Image: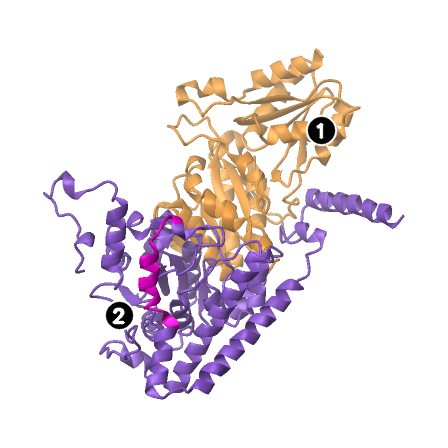
Amino acid sequence: MTDLQKLTIGKALNLGLRRAMEEDPKVLIMGEDVGKLGGVFRITDGLQKDFGEQRVLDTPLAESGIIGTAVGLAVRGFRPVCEIQFEGFIFPGFDQISSQVAKLHYRTQGKIKMPIVIRVPFGGGIGAVEHHSESPESLFAHIPGLKVVSVSNAVDAYWGIQQAIKSDDPILFFEPKKLYHSGAMKSEVDTEATPDELFKSRVVREGTTATVVAYGPSVKVALDAAAAAEDEGKSLEVIDLRTLSPLDLEPVFESVRKTGRLIALSEAPSESSLTSEIAARVQQECFYSLEAPVLRVTGFDTPYPPAKLEEHYLPDLDRVLHTVDRSLAW
Amino acid sequence: MPSEHWTHPEPGDGPAAVAAQPSPEQVIAGLRATSEGGAELTQLLTPEGERVASPQFDRYVDDIDAEALKGLYRDMVLVRRADREANAMQRQGQLGIWVPLLGQEAAQIGSGRALRKGDMAFPSYREHGVAYTRGVDLKEVLGIFRCTDHSGWDYKAHGFHPYTIVIGNQVLNAAGYAMGQKFEGKVGDDDSEATICYFGDGATSQGDVHEGFVWAAVYDAPLVFFCQNNQWAISEPTERQSRLPLYQRARGYGFPGIRVDGNDVLACLAVSRWALEECRHGNGPVLIEAFTYRMDAHTTTDDPTRYRLSDELEEWKLKDPIERVRAYLARGGGADQAFFDQVQADSDAFAAELRDYCFNMPEPPPDRIFSNVYAESTPLLDAQREEFLSYLDGFVGAGEH
């Protein structure tokens, strides 16, 4: 029986976490304020009440502690889901993530598995103070042993979090905080459906003039830009990467072979980033199909600015359309 | 503590009491003042090999008769002999690096022999003696230092986690593991489980160790923190890590801390058994500071003559962990010369076996680079592997002609 619910990304994550906890008693949620408060974004709302303090742990305030103890719990056979309150606070845990979470499986030739999910609300546009609006996902995609995904809609949020928890590999799960409770991004979630594979990107809008590839919060920007472009008689194909490591670029290659143009879109700074990697791989695979160089629309190579300036910093649909025009003018 | 060096400044002592950097003379003076371990040092066997009564801890070693003590002696001699052999093999270029345990045999054998099968030990990278007590073949440890592998043993079968090179990381990992034991209800009676975590005096400056103390305390984790204070973190003395004796830090976290003579295998065994028992019964965590001395370099890349005086080493040689047991056994008639000769012969054979294995250790095949990066591999990594192996195949063909 199909059970369709219209959900926000935030609610979809909450229901996905709940279902994962119901299905496997080894799943733990741990982090700062995830229990009674339900997390600063309320993503874990109500879970401690129903699953108890031993499965939803309000931890002491230290990110290395959260990740480092999750490692030990995973060695013991648990499946910890760590919540980092904001992406800018993940760095005290970076050592444990890069030194232990990413490497224990390799170091032990597979004897130790690290089925850890680290949930990271990320991205700007919420008018927050420093350290609350960053996009550090490329740093994690660069570390072998980790997998990195980012969701852009409620369907992927609901299924993706469950698939990430079931995976025996450690996964950084980047959630677009600006869209958590966005009514505009509500979508119908079929909780009985067979979900898409987690590590596959997807064409979310078909087009012929140029391709825009994006992930997380930028997918909405790309779709808005595509809708606006249509009024100008341009047909943009939009691809949601969904998986940042491993990168699934086959649909991007296929699209570029069709449109001949690619715009890679991300809120993160551009230098040495995922968009750099996409540009390099596309020129390698689609050199003879390209009608213009791969262009990028990104945040600037600066620290995240004071929020009064973020509307200039964050890629918006006008910057995307401007870049599409540059590509077409080549 | 009798030493003025360790006196904590009281409020109102003024800025002079908060000296920013001790001079080298002060550092050395401080070490000498604490080289006996202080009045609160738990000791059951003196450096001269005299048994000291301990109303609190004697009962934890009631079962250690002459035969059992001979076993501990043998353990220490074997791991020291293996350690010296590995050190020599590094000097001959057979190992990339070696991390000596010389001088720390009692701390490792005493605490390691206190563990039971269901317990888990989280080592740093110097715990070859603990590995031995957990039944890990030291040949598998050698692979790490010959750089053929990162960790060869079955951690679950041996209850011995892989070595952790990043200072202090394993303390949080151990705290999480011990929390898991607690969550699974493995705590509460004599048959329960516990975890022990090894780290050095230098590690106590790391945030992860502090966080590990916090987590273990908050969750009442059955975790024994076993700090081997060997006085030096490469060239940095304990004075660079703490104003207080390290065991006293436990009080700030709300659990017991105890300083044991780390060169006294009997005391290390007794104190570890006590601490593990506390954990098994749900009264953990516990911090043990094993007051010992690294008699060799930090690693074979290190040159301790640059930062410490030979006097200090000579002083600690008088407290050698093996010699005191030998003196006790010899004097008490528990062992005759034939026993000591046999242990020596066994340790030589043990070392020869290690050497033979080391020299003939197979090199890992190139595709090992790519194996077990992920539980479920990725298309990109698979493609990279195939491309590299095919590239290598080209050389095979070229070489045949």
Q: Are marks 1 and 2 in contact (CB under 8 Å)?
A: no
Colour seen for chain A: orange
Residue underneath mark 2: B42
Chain to which mark 2 belongs: B
User: What residue is rendered at 36% in x and 47% in y?
Assistant: B207
Up-down relation of residue A234 to residue A11 (above or below): above
Q: Give the percent coordinates (x, y) of residue A306.
A: 40, 22
User: Mark 1 = which residue?
Assistant: A282
- Give the structural element (helix, strand or loop) at label 2: loop
Residue stretch in magenta: B306-322
In the rendered structure, which amino acid carries the disc numbered 1?
A: Val
Disc 1 crowd rating (10 Å Cα; few below 14, some 14-19, many 20+) is: many
- Judge whether residue A36 is colored magenta: no
Q: Quadrant of the N terminus of chain B?
A: bottom left
Question: Can the viewer see residue B46 in this picture?
Answer: yes
Q: Position of residue B29 (x, y in %)?
A: 24, 53
